Image (spheres, coloured by chain):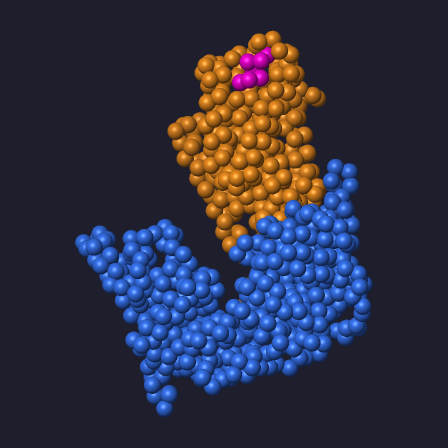
Chain colours: A orange, B blue
């Protein structure tokens, strides 16, 4: 009877992906709104480069990207999950378990490629288990992946007897840790490639479109012939495999499998995804936004260290930034509704 | 004479939503201890009128006199304080709380800031005894049947010392015995001077329980009378009496020979029972029936959205099993759902993205890459063909009007090139201009050989569009009419048969 959607002119444009056709009318305000996180990131960089001369040095910049690599890979998977209105709390622990098992297998003499494959399969398996319980029994992703978080961490501790397994001398892992191509560290390269692929898939393929559709209206997606369960399964598998990749990178970076690797990583990834403009209620988000979110968190971290801000205060500042980002997002959404 | 005794007198009530008049100069009077039946087709304004009466909507115009005093309800609480309670079709109880807690939820007795359980139990027991309703007030509401929950709602209404209780389709979800019990209670309330407004589609019930019947049509009073003197035929006439306007395309008669789909003995426990029918090539098959007749559920079962417990489906003579919506789509069946918002629209998608949602695979190439250009071309074609009014295909669909949203959803399903197109209330909530365009689209499709099933609650629409009409009531087919046989009266009689 009444139709609240008639008010066309007052809603601000909300593109769901940047490759899509230009949407709505543009003005400076909406352009700023759309890129508010990017602007925040730039302002932060300006601030830190003014307050510390080391900030703009090439090694520091590379360091920021290196810091961002593992969190970024995890955040890619998280973006897919979050856009379907899900969440994956298990990825931090899966990073630990696959990283640890890769280290353990290398130590026991298994070829490094085989060890890495096993690590990735473990990541994938965790995704299959999450996806199975979520799609088959309609369980809440929060609870299923919370279970995965506890279980995977526990398996890591059992497998390693809570010890660190050092694989510092493995040549392939050394290459991952220190190698570079044309001056760009391998880890940054891998992460960049993953971001490009993930962005392409999400914004250009049928699968990506289905991910958005499910997140914004699951029932309508089902009525429209989309195999909702399969797409949901896929996003948890993607998150799991990427957690496996994260585990490999973690072990390479630290030179060892450590039982406490990736603690809180899932939470930082969620923060990055949300700062990057994804909505936890689904249907909205971009890989580009997530990249900005990850960089923002790591610029803040590095910058605070450079300024010698006590680590006791860093959490407070980080928390405020996350809250602020979510607040701005929530306010600008309200405006568009 | 009646006016002097009137408990409630509403005069000249009007209410519009975005320029559409839902109520137009409606008068409504209820006397003390009277049971008034409120009757009307879907969209006739019953619910809006009751929402005005229960304080949910403020009327644009008109007066409400309660016991001779003018009153203004600014919210549901206001209406309640004046002694008007509403029992909605979807009950408003808290399932995890007890019967007693539910009854007094708005004024839980307290002693020094703590819930006074003794008093709560004692008072609710009193109320329940008064109603003759034997349930332990400590029972959790979720453990009760819908009928029993309704009694709790009535007890709750009485706890506010209501002078008047509005019951919206109270028997739609309860058993026959529970209905008998409900009627006993209504009679006893009546003897205590409490007035009841009884909204129902079921003619037999209206006659059994109501003293007076008021009919609404298109947001206006269509007539009223005492149930002792008003004949069912007269009511039906008041219900449907509008002129058939020329908004339906001329339909040429054609032969129904080739069966494209046959539904045989479809049953789902408690929903629909032993449904069989055939659908012919190029036919528009109208499905009529009141809310709760399970028309939508039947169609969702054919489309693979819901399961059936029994039955077979034949497409072109071949038995098929449809397990999912994608199954149905690949077999050439499409469904334009009843609830556009919940089952159709992807709200933050553009028009293009909404239109191509089901057929993306057809326009994607290597590695499922979507062909954005083709996507736009397809949509532009539909924008022209269905005259979808939108600034461009890139506009977010929620910025379009209801009618244009509906056309975009129809475009989504046309792009599947279905052989069988099921439309569930295709013109609900859209304006008359868009309606007649949608009729033309449906008509053209059928003329080109697509078989159409159209569910509609609007009788003129069903009669104006269909080659053949099936009427459903309570999960059964209760009538079948050819285009020539169908009249509003015969359909209404079938739709209220046996319920």
- Quadrant position of residue B412: bottom right
Question: Which secondary structure class fits the magenta region best?
Answer: helix
Q: Is residue B186 left or right of residue B445?
A: left
Q: Left of B33 or right of it: where is B474? A: right
Image quarter where the N terminus of chain B lies is bottom left
Residue drawn at x 71%, y 72% as measured from the top left: B482
State whether residue B484 appears in this view.
yes
Nearest to the observer: residue B302 or residue B403 = B302
Q: Nearer the viewer, residue B317 or A5?
A: B317
Residue B209 x %, y %? 42, 75
Magenta stretch holds residue A59: no
Q: Position of residue B133 (x, y in %)?
A: 31, 63
Where residue B231 appears, as percent x and y from the top left, is 52, 83
Residue A208 is situated, as x and y percent measured from the top left of the image, at 66, 42
- Residue at x 60% of width, y 37% of height: A233
Residue interval drawn in magenta = A100-106
Residue A103 in the magenta stretch? The answer is: yes
Query: Which residue occupies 61% across, 67% down?
Result: B478
Which of the pair A58/B499 is nearer the observer? B499
């Amino acid at each position: 009877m009444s139709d609240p959607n008639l008010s066309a002119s007052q809603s601000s444009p909300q593109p769901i992906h940047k490759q899509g056709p230009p949407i709505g009318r543009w003005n400076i305000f909406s352009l700023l709104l759309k890129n508010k996180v990017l602007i925040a990131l730039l302002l932060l960089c300006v601030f830190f480069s003014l307050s510390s001369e080391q900030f703009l040095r090439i090694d520091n910049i590379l360091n920021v990207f290196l810091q961002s690599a593992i969190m970024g890979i995890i955040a890619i998977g998280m973006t897919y999950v979050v856009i379907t209105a899900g969440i994956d709390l298990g990825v931090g622990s899966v990073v630990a378990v696959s990283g640890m098992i890769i280290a353990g297998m290398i130590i026991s003499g298994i070829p490094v490629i085989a060890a890495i494959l096993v690590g990735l399969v473990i990541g994938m398996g965790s995704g299959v288990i999450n996806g199975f319980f979520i799609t088959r029994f309609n369980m809440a992703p929060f609870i299923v992946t919370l279970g995965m978080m506890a279980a995977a961490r526990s398996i890591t501790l059992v497998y390693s007897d809570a010890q660190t397994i050092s694989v510092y001398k493995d040549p392939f892992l050394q290459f991952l840790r220190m190698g570079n191509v044309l001056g760009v560290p391998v880890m940054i390269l891998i992460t960049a490639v993953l971001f490009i692929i993930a962005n392409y898939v999400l914004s250009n393929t049928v699968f990506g479109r289905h991910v958005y559709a499910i997140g914004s209206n699951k029932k309508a997606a089902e009525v429209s012939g989309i195999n909702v369960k399969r797409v949901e399964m896929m996003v948890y598998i993607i998150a799991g495999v990427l957690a496996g990749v994260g585990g490999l990178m973690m072990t390479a970076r630290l030179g060892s499998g450590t039982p406490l690797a990736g603690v809180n990583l899932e939470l930082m990834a969620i923060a990055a995804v949300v700062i990057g403009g994804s909505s936890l209620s689904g249907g909205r988000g971009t890989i580009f936004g997530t990249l900005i979110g990850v960089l923002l968190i790591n610029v803040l971290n590095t910058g605070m260290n450079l300024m010698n801000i006590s680590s006791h205060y860093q959490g407070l500042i980080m928390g405020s930034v996350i809250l602020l980002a979510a607040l701005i997002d929530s306010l600008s959404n309200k405006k568009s509704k | 004479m009646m006016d002097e005794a009137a408990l409630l007198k509403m005069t000249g009530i009007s209410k519009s939503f975005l320029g559409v008049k839902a109520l137009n100069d409606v008068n409504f009077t209820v006397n003390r201890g009277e049971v008034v039946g409120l009757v009307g087709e879907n969209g006739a304004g019953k619910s809006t009128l009751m929402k005005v009466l229960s304080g949910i909507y403020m009327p644009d115009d008109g007066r409400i006199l309660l016991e001779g005093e003018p009153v203004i309800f600014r919210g549901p609480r206001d209406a309640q304080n004046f002694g008007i309670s509403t029992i909605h079709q979807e009950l408003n109880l808290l399932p995890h709380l007890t019967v007693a807690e539910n009854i007094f939820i708005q004024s839980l007795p307290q002693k020094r800031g703590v819930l006074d359980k003794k008093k709560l139990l004692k008072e609710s027991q009193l109320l329940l005894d008064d109603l003759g309703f034997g349930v332990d007030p400590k029972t959790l509401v979720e453990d009760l049947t819908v009928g029993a929950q309704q009694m709790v709602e009535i007890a709750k209404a009485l706890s506010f010392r209501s002078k008047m209780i509005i019951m919206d389709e109270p028997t739609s979800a309860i058993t026959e015995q529970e209905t008998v019990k409900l009627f006993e209670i209504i009679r006893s309330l009546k003897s205590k001077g409490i007035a009841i407004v009884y909204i129902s589609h079921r003619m037999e019930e209206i006659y059994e329980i109501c003293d007076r019947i008021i009919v609404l049509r298109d947001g206006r009073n269509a007539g009223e009378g005492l149930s002792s003197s008003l004949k069912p035929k007269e009511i039906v006439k008041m219900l449907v009496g509008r002129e058939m306007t020329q908004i339906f395309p001329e339909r040429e008669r054609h032969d129904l020979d080739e069966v494209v789909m046959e539904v045989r003995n479809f049953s789902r426990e408690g929903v629909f029972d032993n449904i069989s029918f055939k659908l012919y090539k190029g036919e528009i098959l109208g499905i009529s029936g009141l809310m709760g007749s399970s028309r939508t559920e039947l169609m969702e079962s054919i489309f693979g959205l819901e399961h059936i417990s029994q039955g077979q489906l034949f497409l072109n003579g071949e038995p098929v099993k449809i397990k999912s919506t994608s199954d149905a789509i690949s077999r050439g069946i499409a469904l334009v759902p009843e609830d556009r918002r919940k089952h159709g629209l992807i709200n933050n998608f553009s028009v293009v993205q909404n239109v191509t949602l089901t057929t993306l695979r057809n326009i994607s190439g290597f590695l499922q890459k979507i062909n954005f250009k083709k996507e736009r071309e397809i949509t532009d074609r539909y924008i022209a063909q269905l005259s979808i009014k939108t600034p461009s295909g890139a506009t977010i669909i929620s910025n379009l009007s209801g009618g244009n949203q509906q056309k975009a959803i129809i475009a989504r399903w046309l792009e599947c090139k279905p052989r069988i197109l099921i439309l569930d209330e295709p013109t609900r909530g859209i304006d008359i201009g868009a309606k007649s365009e949608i009729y033309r689209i449906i008509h053209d499709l059928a003329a080109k050989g697509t078989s159409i099933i159209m569910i509609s609650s609007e009788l003129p629409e069903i009669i104006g569009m269909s080659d053949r009409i099936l009427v459903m009531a309570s999960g059964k087919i209760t009538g079948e009419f050819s285009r020539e046989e169908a009249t509003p009266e015969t359909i209404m009689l079938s739709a209220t048969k046996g319920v």
